[in-house]
Amino acid sequence: MEVKNQVAPNTDVAVSFFSEKEDGPFVMVNLLKFKEKAEYDDGSDAGLSGREAYQRYGTVVTQCLQKVGGRLIFGGVVTGLLLGEIEENWDMVALVEYPSLEAFRNMTSLPEFIAASAHRTAGLAGQLNIKVKSSAIA
């Protein structure tokens, strides 16, 4: 299995994801890798770490989640890897619950979310976003 962190999905993946007909709650697993130093397009805030820039994004996203009925379930720093092999570990994991795909779409179109995305881009070296639906385990 090859793993490639990205900061944003490519257009084909985004179109496919957002056009799904599936409804109901889901959890987005966010595996985050931060840049050592934040990199804003305009060169501002050069003294911030990538983690600090992403925290600015996270503050706004928490408010956006509340507007669409979502919530942060868990966020934590990655401290080790027990099973498997990867070239480099992620820095943080966040689990975010959304009531529906429509709520997720609505959140990503909020003006404050769009504006805060500059902090996300400045702070992230890459990430994986994994959509998970609840199911019974046999």
Image: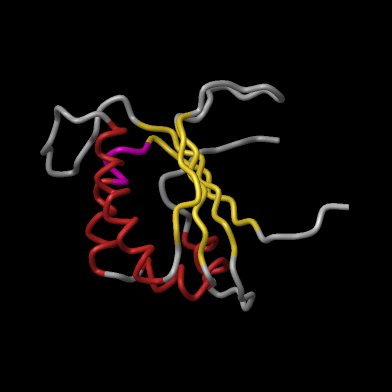
In depth, the one of 22 and 75 nearer the eye is: 75
Q: Is residue 67 left or right of residue 96?
A: left
Q: In which image quadrant can residue 67 be found?
A: bottom left
Please indicate whether residue 15 sits to the left or right of residue 66 in the image.
Answer: right
- Reply above or below: 21 against 114: below
- Observer-nearest of 120 and 57: 57
Residue 111: x and y in percent read: 24, 68
Relative height, residue 130 to residue 88 (above, below): below
**Residue 35 shown left or right of residue 31 in the figure:** left
- The residues colored magenta run 120-124
Secondary structure mostly taken by the magenta-highlighted segment of the chain? helix
In this picture, residue 135 sits left or right of residue 103: right
What x and y, as percent, mark residue 98? 51, 64
In the rendered image, the quadrant that contains the N terminus is top right
85 is higher (above) or lower (below) than 123: above
- Position in image of residue 73 (x %, y %): 50, 51
Residue 96: % across, % down: 49, 54
